[in-house]
Structure formats: C-alpha cells, structure tokens
Image (cartoon, grey):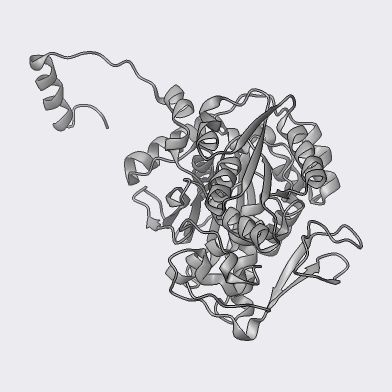
Amino acid sequence: MDVTTQERVEAYCGTCKRSLPSKSYLIRCPHCRGLIYFRYDWDHVQLREKPNSIWRFSDLLPIQQLEHIVSLGEGSTPLIRSNLKQEGTLFLKNEAQNPTGSVKDRAMSVGISKARELGISRVMNASTGSAGLSTAAYAARAGMRSAIIVPRGAPFERVAAMVAFGALVLPFDGTIWEALRFCEQAAGELGAFQSATLRPVNPYQNEGSKTIAYELWEEQPDQIDWVVAPRGSAGILAGIAHGFEDLRRLGLAQRMPRMAAVELAHLNSMEQAWRAGETNEENLRRLALTLDEGQPTIAVKLAHAYPDDGEEALSVIAQSDGAVVSVNDLEITEALRSVARADGLFIEPSSAAALAGYSKLVSRHTIQPGERVAVILTGSGFREMKVIASILEEPMSLYGETSARDRLQRFFAGAEGE
C-alpha cells in the first residue's frame, strides 16, 4: 500500500455540531457528551480497487496517516445468491470470511489502526466472543498488549484463541454489562484504548461497518431493496445505513435500502420500542430492564436486552421505512440447518437469527415478492461448535460393510436424508 497522508477527516459532535480535534482520542463530545461522527472531503473521495481489504475505502475511514493501518485482509467478503426457495432474490453477505471469522474484524481494523495513530499501545475490551477475539488478533498484529475482560461463566472454548494471540484474559465476577463498565473505567485509568464496537464507547470502530454498504453497492448498485442484520448492540445496521448515506452524498447511490434489525424474542426491546414509537435511549433502557437476560439461548452473541446503538439504529430504520422483528431459538435452528443444506454455509446461531428474521418478514408480507434482499451473516459456525453440536447432535451408530453399503444405497437413492 502506498503511504500517503490524509488531512481530510473532521470529527464532530452529532448533538451540539461542534467540530472536534481529529488527532485527539475521542470517546464522547467533551462539551455536551454527545456521540462523535466524522466528515470527509467529499470532493476528493475515491473508491479504489486495491488493496483487497476495507482500506481501499480509506478516504471514508477516520485514519489520517495510512502508515498506521493494521490489516489482516478484512472485508471484500462474498455476496452469494442463495439457493433457498423464496419469491424474491436473496443474497447472503458472508462475513464469516473475515480473518477471525466475524464481521467485527472490519471495526477492529479501524479501531486498532486509530490506536496506533494516536500512539496508544494498550488495548482493552469486555467481551464473551467475537469482539474480544478480534481485539486480540489485531492487537497481536500491531504488536500491542491487549486485555480482554470476560464475564463470569464464559466457557474456555470462547477465550482459547484470545489466549493464543497473547491477550490477558481476565475473568470478571459480574455480567457482561458490569464487565463493560469496569473496562471503561479501567481503560481510562490505565491509558488504554477501549476497542468496544459501540459508538458511545468507540466512535472510530463504528465506521468500519460502513464498508459493507460500499461492497453491496459495488456488486448490486441500487438493486438491493432490503438489508437485514442481527441485532447485538445494533451498531452494524446503523453503520451500514451510514455507508449508504455516504454513497448518496457522493452521487453514487440513488437511494438507501430499507433496513431491518432482527433480535431475540425474549430480549426484544427494540421491537417493542419501534412498535410503540418510543425510540429514544431512555425508553430503550426502561424496556431492557423488564427483560430477562438470564434466559438460555443458542444465540449468545445477541443476548443483550439493551442495544447501546439502538437509538441510532431505530432512527435509520425509521428513515428507510424499515422494520424490527424478533425470532426464537427454534426458528434460528431451522434457519441454520436450511442455509447449510441449501448453500453450503455453516454460520453461527446469531447469523442464523438474521436469516430467520428474513423468513418472518417474508411470511408477514413486509418483504414483498420480487424484492432483492441482502442478509448479513455476521460470523462462522466453526467458532460455535459446542453450541451447534448440542442442537444438531444425533445418535451415531456403527456399521459393518454390509449394513454400510445398504445404508449408502438407500441414501443415494433418495430414500433418506431429505
């Protein structure tokens, strides 16, 4: 990659609209505590063909000096036309192809690059899975020390790779939300960069999700009618919407697709807020307090009652005439099986939730026949083998040569396995 210097990024507060120093470490607006956003030099933006990562969109990412970029080849993930039977056209954006098997790599490449540009060599995150793994990998690539705070009860198979990357994995006696609060306090005290993929905590990393919109537009310019994504913090959906806003501002895209968030049925704070028209942060927090995060689910990465980026996501859903829908574990399991058998994609339950939500929106006629839909598959099922094995496990009998041949004949004749 050619090393050049950009002076075309301006940080600003989304509330008071003040311009802020882009070369300082920003979390919230120092004047009003509003959320931080970025402006770019729209007259000189180029969408390049190289390198084969999100950094070909560097003119639209908040890094001033490209020599600080930390990349593992994230982005440029395949957009696959699904074989699943549907009345319209279903595309699957397979984010499992990212370096650590998760969409989080887009955000982390931006965040760790910004930390390096700011001269920060310590990185912290609170996570039970994807964000922690991605933090550990990119910090290792950058030669930084990383610490991952994991809440009580986190199984070792979720943190083993973090240990392999050299991160300090610190079990914390509390919930994920208590761990996040502790991480925020400790990072400030220790001068560490907090690599959470939430705009209220890290405005830089949210910009990484925008690159999904750029790639969708490149492959299907103005042809995607809906984008459907699973809801964790809700930052991915909000980021994709901002990416389409960038494309419209550049005169490249004519419209924004309708945006849909999919969440768990027992943790559907966004769905309740959307239906009631009470979509501000205060109402989301109130609704979240009424929901039970302790209820078991196979989609553990979506098991958050309160979405930190929920207010922003609900705003873009409203602007795009989109939707919020919720699904349960049975629907998620069926979606996971269906896409594996129809398309050869082995996805994590949280990704399957988005596909289950798509099916529900079709059955409700929210998504109309003939519409073209992109479902964001956020992560690989190979990182969730224990959970997936528990829901798909079947008895495995031993066969001798004669019984094995008989079974094979019946299978290939179509007598079983449909």
The residue positioned 72% from the left and 69% from the top of the image is 38
Residue 322 visible (yes or no): no
The reply, left or right, for residue 356 in relation to residue 324 is left
Q: In which quarter of the image is residue 256?
A: bottom right
Nearest the viewer among 386 and 139 is: 139
Nearest the viewer among 222 and 321 is: 222
The residue positioned 48% from the left and 66% from the top of the image is 215
Residue 72 visible (yes or no): yes
Q: Position of residue 172 (x, y in %)?
A: 71, 27
| Residue 131 against residue 240 in the figure, above or below | above
| Residue 98 against residue 42 in the figure, above or below | above
The residue positioned 79% from the left and 31% from the top of the image is 290
The residue positioned 48% from the left and 56% from the top of the image is 72
Q: Where is residue 358 in the image (x, y as percent from the top left)?
A: 52, 48
The C terminus appears in which quarter of the rendering?
A: top left
The reply, left or right, for residue 318 in relation to residue 285 is left
Q: In which quarter of the image is residue 44?
A: bottom right
| Residue 38 against residue 417 in the figure, above or below | below
Q: Where is residue 120 in the image (x, y as percent from the top left)?
A: 70, 55
The reply, left or right, for residue 326 in relation to residue 415 is right
Q: In which quarter of the image is residue 183?
A: top right
